[in-house]
Amino acid sequence: MLKPFLKIAVFTICLIPALWLGYAVYLAYTGGENLLGPDPAKMLSLETGKWAIWMLILALSITPLRYLFNKPFLWQFRRMIGLYALFYAVLHFTVFLAFLLQWQWGELSREIVERPYITVGFIAFVLLVPLGLTSTQYAQRKLGRNWKRLHRLVYLTALLAVVHVVWIVRSSIGDAVLYGVLVLVSLSYRLLVLYFPGVKAYSLGRIGRFCN
Amino acid sequence: MLIRTKKGHEIASSEITPESVYRSRRQFMADSTKALIGSMAAGSSLLISNTNAQTGDALFARAPAEINLASKPKWLVQKVAERKTDTEVGAFSTDEALTPFADVTTYNNFYEFGTGKEDPSTSAKDFIIDPWKVEITGEVGKPGSYTLEDILAPHTLEERIYRMRCVEAWSMVIPWIGFPLADLIKRFEPNSDAKFVEFLTLEDDRQMPGQRSRFATIDWPYREGLRMDEAMHPLTMLAVGLYDDILPAQNGAPLRLVVPWKYGFKSIKSIVSINFRKTMPNTTWNDLQASEYGFYANVNPAVSHPRWSQASERRLPGGLFGASRIPTQPFNGYGEEVASLYDGMDLKRYY
């Protein structure tokens, strides 16, 4: 009824950027119209990276939103959006390796070691993999309390992703600032809950009713 | 922005001189002279009318008619149209494949109009280049405020096809139209204290939205500089046009510098001031991040940018599946002409 429909809708919406980019790559491969501009490798890299970090931000915001607006139905999206972050991160890394480095693995190791922004980006990517692998209900059961501990790595991933973006900026820091602010707000909610567990009970709806 | 919508002022592709036509026009210019002479000798008028059919007005008319300027001064368009083509000028042009006009004019770093690559071409609407004044100041015998017409009047324009290498590791091949900076400098009679030349870009936040942005990290106006010997070098040019027409706003209308052996950020756009100094001027990128952007900024594959390698570049337009990645040459391939300027200089230190 309503619930699966919503999940399918969100799933499809999150897929749209990848579908569009895939179509653009297909056109490039078959010699059709160029949708990616004169530097398609760079464009693809920026787009996939952008969506990876947005998915990460969205996934991180589910918990605060769930509690602030008292909407438990939001839980069902967290894993899906988190996996989308991994999905776009995989695409981002693949674009980098395939189109910017032309599959030169030697170049890849050199870039990872010598370029700090790539080092942190690579670490962030690598950290997402075990999170993806343990995203199943089976893994949740098997890991028990340790599952929560493992998945706290996503906080580090988000911070590293922001540093990665800041470090590649040449002039305009607007985007980097936005990502940074969103990630920090999301993380500070968790810090707040850590010190004041009662915060979870405060939904904005409640405060509204209280003020009335 | 994933979906590109056509904006009103975008140039229709039918109005752009196709490269094949552009190339063949120059071949035609060479051939037509021979044809003309040949036909006069043979007395055959048929040959003349044949060559005329592929020619002249039709080709010029297909040059972009609508570029994003408030007005195109007729005298400037005329002067650009009368330029010497590169087949006549020769020595400085490369014969590598040209970067298509559409890419040269829609993939730009001109942060005054926004930091996206497509921002300059879309947000420089109705940029005003007429009237335009250039202030000449400093260690010269003839300082003053010169109009664009005064600046250009005594110079014959010529076409030069230069490589341009951006510090971001992409590059283009662009047919500029302009004249040697040295010829301009001589007119102002610099004295022996003139060791450096400093250039400034227009600062006008009514026309340049990027200058209003709170997130831009640049302290306007954009400034650049050259050592006197670099400025006087025959390769250094001032450009007023590209391909068949005057410069569009996003390429630095109406007057810009082109220093092909240095990273592109040295080729300052929309120049309003030329100042001759005893001491090395501050330059915008060096002020922003001295560890990454030096004064000299010579293209050098051996000296990495701290955050990325400069050993190779993506020649645009790039294909995803073709190898458009090429090794970067020292001095962007102009080493034979300019390396001697830096004899004895440690280029790792003076980057």
Image: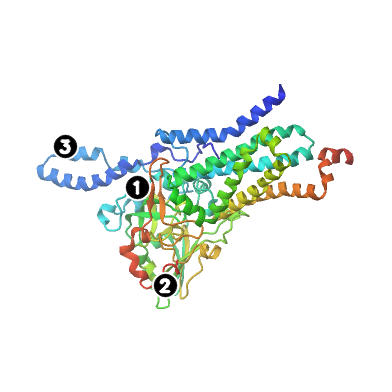
**Residue of label 1:** B98
Q: Residue furthest front?
A: A142
The chain letter for the residue carrying disc 2 is B
**Residue of label 3:** B46
Which residue shows up at 49% across the image and 33% down it?
A23
Using the numbered discs, state the Cα–Cα distance from disc 2 to disc 3 in whole angstroms: 55 Å
Using the numbered discs, state the Cα–Cα distance from disc 2 to disc 1 in whole angstroms: 39 Å
Position of the N terminus of chain B, as image quadrant, is: top right
Mark 1: secondary structure: loop
Q: Is the C-beta separation of discs 1 and 3 under 8 Å?
A: no
Which residue shows up at 16% across the image and 37% down it?
B46
Q: Earlier in the sequence, mark 2 or mark 3?
A: 3
Locate residue A10, reporting x and y percent.
65, 31
Q: Residue furthest left?
A: B42
Q: Nearer the viewer, residue A22 or B98?
A: A22
Position of the C terminus of chain B, as image quadrant, is: bottom left
Q: Nearer the viewer, residue B341 or B114?
A: B341
- Amino acid carrying mark 3 in the image: Leu
**Residue of label 2:** B142
Q: Is the C-beta separation of discs 2 and 1 under 8 Å?
A: no
The answer to whether A97 is drawn above or below residue B345 in the figure is above
The answer to whether B326 is drawn above or below residue B6 in the figure is below
Which of label 2 and label 1 is nearer to you?
A: 1
The chain letter for the residue carrying disc 3 is B
- Amino acid carrying mark 2 in the image: Lys
Locate residue A81, reporting x and y percent.
64, 36
Mark 2: secondary structure: loop
